[in-house]
Amino acid sequence: MEADFDFSGYVTKAGLKCSDGRTIMPDAFKHQDTLQVPLVWQHGHNDPENVLGHVVLENRTDGVYGYGFFNKSGKAEHARGLVEHNDISAMSIWANDLIERAGRVLHGAIREVSLVLSGANPGAFIENVTLRHSDDDETVLDDEAIIYTGLKLEHASDGDDDETIADIYNSMTEKQQEVVHFMIGEALATDGDDEPLAQSSIEDDDNADISDVYQSMSPKQQELVHFMIGEALESNTGDALTQSNLDDNTTDDTKGNEMKRNVFESGDKNGAKAPVISHDDMKTIVSDAARTGSLKHAVTEYALAHGITNIETLFPDAKAISDVPEWIARRTEWVSDLLGACRKSPFSRIKTLSADLTFESARAKGYIKGNLKREEFFGVASRTTTPTTIYKKQALDRDDVIDITDFDVIAWLKAEMRLMLDEELARAILMGDGRDVASEDKINEQNIRPIAKDHELYTTTVNVNVDDAGSSMTEVVDSVIANRFRLKGTGLPTFYTTEYWIARFLLLRDADGHRMYKTLAELAAELRVANVVAVEAMLDDPDMIGIIVNPVDYVLGADSGGNVSMFDDFDIDYNKMKYLIETRCSGALTKVKSAMVLRRVAAATVLVEPVTSPTFVKSTGVVTIPTQTGVTYKNETTGATLVAGAQPALAVGQSLKVLATPNAGYYFATNAQDQWTFTR
């Protein structure tokens, strides 16, 4: 660079954290080497007079260096005087198109360099100020180099450097010092019986690893690392880390100990020669690590080439990739969708009223003049669903809460409690909680009515044999299409099933070997549903193929005090922190014929279809039970089996409810054709 610039210095320094939390990595702006960008005042964009000149960028291994040129404007001349007088000593960059990973800027574009009152990057400072005289002579005021935030300029050494080890050590950042401590501890752990030093907190929010931190050190700081570890190995103690020793040692032979031992010397203390990693070798290793992304791999490769054994002792312990433990749980994406779609009621007692208009007597009638107009008759049925409490309780020993410092264990535990409460409620809504009726923990199915087990007035059950020879999942699709007229719910429903059954659908092929359903969207269109949702909890019932329902037809009722609430308490006697989350609500389908359940039957069972209906003579009140193979007819009220043939005549106003049930080894296509009521 020709010396016609007005000032120069680093516009940003690699490996140092800016005050805004970012860390600029080496060569992040390498593609802008020799590029010219505007020089502005305090990043001011609202006034063209804020443009003071331009800066020519120069990419270096330790950052981006800039050569500043002032223009002839009044503000530029004023800024020149401020720089020459040392009133302004900091530069800052404005960049965009940043590629950032974990707080580390890997790539970006510098759009401008600004003179600022204080720099965001602690390594950005004005280094050289050039005065241009009237005769065009230039004077570079090297002695007026400005140092910002303690970073020293590196001048050519003439052998009289009297900088002490303490000075170099103190010039390191806290992160660099922690890496030094860790590396010394590892070296001691492999050289003697001393326990290795704790790693402290090597990785912070920007996840900088040891390679990045080491690479951010200056050559003098890296040399100090080598020296201190060598001294520690010779004494087999951590004394090299004490402040007193640091103050007493210098990098000059005339002032004390010489940096004569290498960091990674593996020879014995008597001077026997052994494989050594020199300072230049270490630079090569770190360079390879930056290229491959693994310091361990780079050092291991060097070790294999140079005969170093037990190289793994130089590496730190494994670190967790997440701050909190990961859940091993069922997939619960469906839970929030289901609960969010259910209709909410501000009252916990849900009452539904329904009138069956499908009977013959409910039909409108034609009139002939002179005849009696007869009233229609239909029944009104009601169902009331009352609330129940669903809860989850946890406890933590207070000592454990205090000792766990890596993450907020209480917040983590509360999140788990809410997750499991929501899943249990959603499971109870779809198919019940699966617990035995005698279990104290069972969610009462009269309070949260499962769609899969609801009365046939609300849920139609379709049985399919898909496991016998020659059967396939096309029979399920055919059954849904054939019985689709029974669904009278709101809008397009959702098909809730499992990944097992989804796989069986998607594996279907036509006669030419082509997949019949390439996507879930194609399957949903065939079944005439809005979408297909996988419910892992449904795997607990292997015979349930799926549930077709629109959740908006299911109502969850809760009074103001029954909403999901979290409580906490402290048990003084047992030093326990206790937490409880609970809700008190009710739930039920409120629209008749709004759901369909698909179930698999045993492969050996035989379909009985159609079920023959009993006959009834209204004038005599006689019901006749037919004979059909595989079917037993019962009195639904008493449960008694009805023998085939004419039954005793019913008295006026008396009713008989007949229920048809399949015999062992047989099954009905649905539950919608197996019950009749006869009234005289």
Image: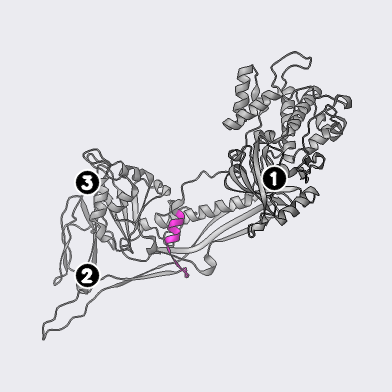
What number is the disc on residue 606? 3
Q: How far apart are marks 3 and 2 (CA)?
A: 31 Å
Q: Name the quadrant of the N terminus.
A: top right
State which tag comes first along the sequence, 3 or 2: 2
Residue 388, can we see it?
Answer: yes
Secondary structure at numbered mark 2: loop
Secondary structure at numbered mark 1: strand
Q: Residue at left 22%, top 46%?
A: 606
Farthest front residue? 135
Disc 2 crowd, CA 10 A, few/some/many (<14, 14-19, 20+) = few
**Tag 3 near tag 2, CB within 8 Å:** no
| Vertical arrangement, residue 411 with respect to residue 280, above or below | below
Please state the horizontal and vertical placement of residue 495, each as a whole percent of the image. Answer: 35, 53
Residue beneath label 2, please?
A: 359
**Image position of 146 (left or right of 313):** right
Q: Distance between the residues labelled 1 and 3?
A: 91 Å
What number is the disc on residue 68? 1
Secondary structure at numbered mark 3: strand
In the rendered image, which quarter is residue 240 located in? Answer: top right
**Tag 2 near tag 1, CB within 8 Å:** no
Residue span colored magenta: 335-348
**Mark 3 is on which residue type?**
Val
**Mark 2 is on which residue type?**
Phe
Report if residue 340 lies within the magenta region.
yes
Please state the horizontal and vertical placement of residue 148, each as a whole percent of the image. Answer: 77, 45
**Mark 1 is on which residue type?**
Gly
State which tag comes first along the sequence, 2 or 1: 1
In the rendered image, which quarter is residue 552 located in? Answer: bottom left
Q: Name the quadrant of the C terminus.
A: bottom left
In this rendering, which labeled residue sits more in front, label 2 or label 1?
A: 1
In this rendering, which labeled residue sits more in front, label 1 or label 3?
A: 1
